[in-house]
Amino acid sequence: MFTYLLKRLLLFFPTLIIISLIIFGISRLSSIDPVAQQLVEFEELSFEALQKEQQLLAKKWGLDKPVFYFTLSSKAYPDTLHKIGLEVERQACEKLIAQYGNWDKIQLYRQALFDFEAHVYQLPDSLSNQKIEIRAKTGQLISNYKDVVLTSLLEQLQTILSDNTIVQTKLFLSFERLNQSYQTLKTNTTLQLLYLPSFRWHGLNNQYHHWISRFFIGDFGLSYYDARPVADRILEAAKWTVLLNLISIFLAYLLSIPLGVFSAVKRGTAWDSLLSTLLFMLYSLPSFWVATMLIVFITTPEFGMDWFPTAGVGRLDDSASFWQRCWSYAWHLTLPVFCLTYTALAFISRQVRGGMLDVFGKDYIRTARAKGLSNSKVVWKHSFRNALFPIITLFASVLPASLAGSVIIENIFSIPGMGRLALSAIFQADYPVVFTILLITAILTMIGNLIADILYSWADPRVTFT
Amino acid sequence: MTTESSHTTAQSYGQRIRMQFFKSRRAKWSLRIVYVLLFIAVFADFIANEKPIYCQIEGIHYFPILHEYAENLGWTKKEKRFLRGEWQDYEYERVIFPPITYSPSSIDLYNKYKSPFEEQTIKASHFRHWLGTVDVGKDVAAGLVHGTRIAMMVGIIAMLIASIIGILMGALAGYFGDDGFELTRAKCWMGLFGILVGLLWGWWLPWNSILLAAEEEQFFIAFLKGIGILILSLILFFLLAKGLERSPFFSTKVSIPLDILVMRLIEVFNSVPTIFILLAIIAILEKSSIFHVMLVIGLLRWTRIARFIRSELLRIRSLGFIEASKAMGFSNVRILARHAIPNALTPVLITIAFGIAAAILLESALSFLGIGVGPDEMTWGKLLNYARMKTSAWWAAIFPGMAIFITVTVFNLIGDGLSDALDPNKHER
């Protein structure tokens, strides 16, 4: 028993770390770059100020750190790539390296490119047409890496330069340097470096370590959307989700136990088959359909049944009394709670019935009946107590299902809970919020499973590991 | 009683299950409904389409729907006559329209959000929107028919992926257990090295080059190269292992705890709530389509199937016929593929039936929320969502919801019927 518990607990943490790694990996795959998004606001700044702002933004979201504890890449890649603040630039560098394998030449080329860009910024405003065009082309040069594209961009710049003598005199030298550095980049390749692996250790100052260690002290970082702490947004939302789920799971247990026991006691009768069919139908009834039907039919005056509010949780001013508040919440939450409850109810009742039927088949129940105990005593004292345990441990699977259900229900009824936050964060590409919620729900599910397993082993000492 | 039992023993296991299954009227009817749904899914283009199935104009015969198939395959080009104009407006000499004369993407600006019973501005009675319209005059019935195709595809493809992974994983865990899979130390270590080296040089180091190749639409060549390097390194290291096995230390056998490994993997997968991870994955994809949803559901939902197969195989592996095939010197692969898995497969059908229902439900919930479905695809969930945008459109709430409900119920009933048929205790009770 004790060793089982210990083993179970010891395995909790590796699983947690693997899951956090998976989630972190998925979050790294996204193509949205918050630095680039925010940089648009500083379009008017000078070249140096823009570079500085970019570094600051990268620092703000911790994106200037290496991604993981170590990198395993080829010798051709430098270990300072993560310092490039912009995702597109970094990608362009990586792809250039993959083609030519000579980072020192690429660096020279990039320096020439930025030097040229700085010169473009210094063009007088009287040449604004040319300036805009050249800036656009340089921007493309920075984010591109294919030889065909780069060559054609350089040629286009050449023609723009030769069209206007002032521009030519101002930019000629830096453009020549740029052109030359690109040619040397192309000719001096060191492709053999691409096949030499190199392992680099970055230490603890990396994005994953930062994310996960902050996560456990409740600091989830900043939102990409409004730069507020993610923890604040989630805390506000969690209130509603917890309230909804607690009420509905409580109600579901409260109703399903008598229902399940009743239908088990009356097994084989018309009552049982009626209840079973009904519960089966409820089980297959999609909650989002029920919710939509409720909204269509009983929340609008269209069909003469405007009984409940369509959406939201109502807005009360601070002077509202406690009872007014309760009443308003109850009125707004009735339909969502109903939708969440019936799905859990159908599931739990079926399990209760099955559990009771299993117990009814046992010898000790036959003995109890043979001794002449009353039916209610047999049912509640002997059978139900034994069937209760698996029912409690069902909580482990009811909780995640309920959380998943509340994603849909909260969105339909516009309740500002975690499900709604998750969905709106997805549409806003606010990944810190999305992945924090993902990890929180994963941890909740794992804790649910852990508790269920521990309870199981407590109830049935024969349960062994695996 | 005796006659019946002797009767049943004369039948094969599969026949007996089938007989038990068809005894239940509910299961039988559910299966029939599934056939109908499959029929609708396959022939959706001929049931709801704005093009006629057959028409004759100026003495020439046309088959526009079949023609569209040929166009999509690249065999022919578009018919010039039909380039301009609406399909309803041509002057046909003879014409056979599908029963529903709209495609799910057809727009009918004269009939926006029309109820089935309302007066509709249509040219002839067979152009009526039988189940009403939503949005910019999209026909609900056509959306339902084509949504059937997507729902069936989601259910079947997702569960196909899940079954392949689940059966493989479950079979490995259940058949070999923790001590059944033995390798010599040399093979174990060298195999591991082979995989690592192959992955490193085949995939990890040239990853950016592979991405570049993918952009040039040469991904397949790069992919083959990566796989080739992986296989080559595996072969190389296995040859090395053969050499190493001469030393006694390396030829000692160690068992690989496959069961523990697979069970841990299942636990990891079970800890991630499907809907949240689906949302996260769909979120990072730039362009998401229904196929991504199928793939992700399939990749996440294999755990239950694996558990089922594992417990079946734990039971089966100690049975006589497996021992007999072992004694006859058959290889493990052959015993697994020819004897063990086929015998464990029938109970897995239960999980697959429930899994299809769950996958359809999940997909329609997602497309109801507006996630993972492309702009030109019409699904039941998306159709249902129109009822939320305009709450007076009861027809948009009832019909798609009914379709989801019926389909999910039917698959759940089949699962129930199967588990009844497979559980001998149920009949003794």
Image: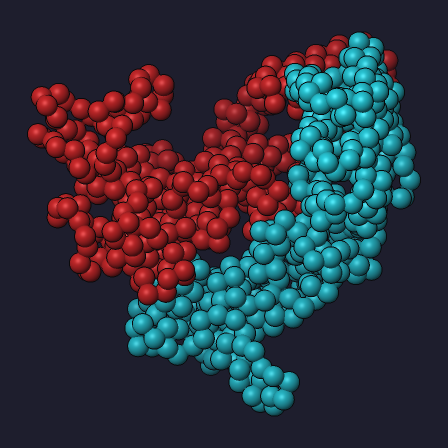
Chain colours: A cyan, B red
Q: In terms of image quadrants, where is residue B299?
A: top right
Please count the marks in the image.
Answer: 0
In the image, residue A381 lies at what x, y percent?
Answer: 55, 77
Which residue shows up at 41% across the image and 50% down it? B382
Which residue shows up at 9% across the image and 21% down it? B59
Q: Is residue B85 above or below residue B221?
A: below
Q: Is residue B422 left or right of residue B123?
A: right
Which residue shows up at 32% across the image and 38% down it? B41
Which residue shows up at 76% across the image and 25% down it? A166
In the image, residue B238 lies at what x, y percent?
Answer: 74, 14
Q: In terms of image quadrants, where is residue A204?
A: top right
Q: Is residue B394 left or right of residue A362?
A: left
Quarter of the figure with the N terminus of chain A: bottom right
| In front of the other: A259 or A401 | A401
Q: Is residue A297 above or below residue A434?
A: below
In the image, residue A146 lies at what x, y percent?
Answer: 68, 20
Q: Is residue A355 above or below residue A53?
A: below
| In front of the other: A149 or A418 | A149
Asked if residue B105 can be seen in this view, the reply is yes
Asked if residue A450 can be seen in this view, the reply is no
| In front of the other: A419 or B311 | A419
Q: Is residue B193 left or right of residue A440?
A: right
| In front of the other: B367 or B164 | B367
Q: In terms of image quadrants, where is residue B262?
A: top right
In the image, residue A212 lies at what x, y percent?
Answer: 80, 50
Q: Is residue B412 left or right of residue A270?
A: right
